[in-house]
Amino acid sequence: MEEQPNNNNDGSGGYWWWAAASGVQLAWGIYSFRKGYSGDSRLMPLKAFGVASLFVGATATATIGTFSASGIHSVKDAVELGENIRSGLGVKGRG
């Protein structure tokens, strides 16, 4: 059986929106952080959680976008990359 090429992940286009989403989340987080707190004090924990979530979301989307754009689509790909880096540095594997 022949494998069909996956045209959705061509390695160049299609990941720009991960970067855009990350940038928007980061900008919104910075804006919210700089704006500070205003309003009812009972909502302060909810607002702080929302701002923190924007920063965590921006980091997550940037990380996933970077991995996807560089061709790391599974844990096996990441392990193989680590083995290649270790062998290139001359470091022995774990086992």
Image (cartoon, helix red, strand yellow):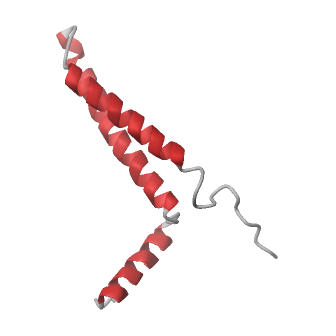
Which residue is rendered at x = 54% and y = 50% of the image?
15
User: In the image shown, does 42 or 50 lie closer to the viewer?
Assistant: 50
Using residue 16 as the reference point, say whether residue 88 is left or right of it: left
Residue 41: percent from left, percent from top: 17, 11
Q: How many marks?
A: 0
- Residue occupying the point 47% across, 40% down: 20
Q: In the figure, is residue 17 to the left or right of 52?
A: right
Establish if 46 lies above or below 16.
Answer: above
Farthest right residue in view: 1
Q: Kindly identify the residue that appears in the image at 60 percent across and 53 percent down.
A: 13
Instruction: Give the quarter of the image for residue 40.
Output: top left
Residue 53 falls in image quadrant: top left
Residue at x 40% of width, y 53% of height:
63
x then y, percent, for residue 48: 23, 26
User: Residue 43's image quarter?
Assistant: top left
Quarter of the image containing the C terminus?
bottom left
Q: Quadrant of the N terminus?
A: bottom right
Q: Nearer the viewer, residue 50 or 95?
A: 50
Q: Position of residue 24 (x, y in %)?
A: 41, 34
Q: Is residue 88 left or right of residue 43?
A: right
